[in-house]
Image: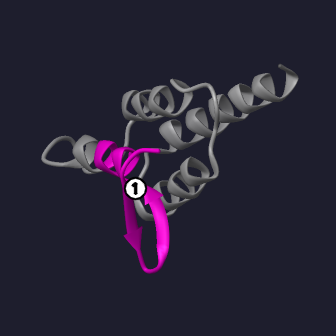
Amino acid sequence: MGEIREIDGTRYDAALLKTAEKLVSGRGDGRLSREDAEAILAQITDGGVYTQLEKDTIAFILEEFEWTEAAADWFGTELGRWRADQTRH
């Protein structure tokens, strides 16, 4: 298991949080873009398993970070497709 970051009593994947923070820090308009969404999805899917820790972290990132509408839509669709593929295997 990777590094954990606890926020308000909930445990999150520190690497995913760092990625999101880095992507919005000091560039653009401070929102996660489609390109950023692709980077986050790649980080989730690299291990082939969507852990509960990652699920909790993504829920936090979706709630607490600003996303462009296109990025949020794309991310939700692609994550859903990947999860559906995982359940078939």
Residue hosting label 1: 66
Q: Nearer the viewer, residue 42 or 71?
A: 42
The answer to whether residue 70 is above or below residue 47 is below
Image-based side of 43 in relation to 87, left or right? left
Image-based side of 63 in relation to 33, left or right? right
At x 73%, y 32%, the residue is 83
Range drawn in magenta: 1-20
Residue 42, image x and y in percent? 47, 26
Task: Assess whether residue 9 is covered by the magenta stretch.
Answer: yes
Residue 6, image x and y in percent? 40, 69
Q: Quadrant of residue 19?
A: top left
Under mark 1, the amino acid is Glu
Indicate how the structure is coloured in the image: one colour
Residue 58, image x and y in percent? 53, 51
At x 73%, y 27%, the residue is 81
The answer to whether residue 42 is above or below residue 8 is above
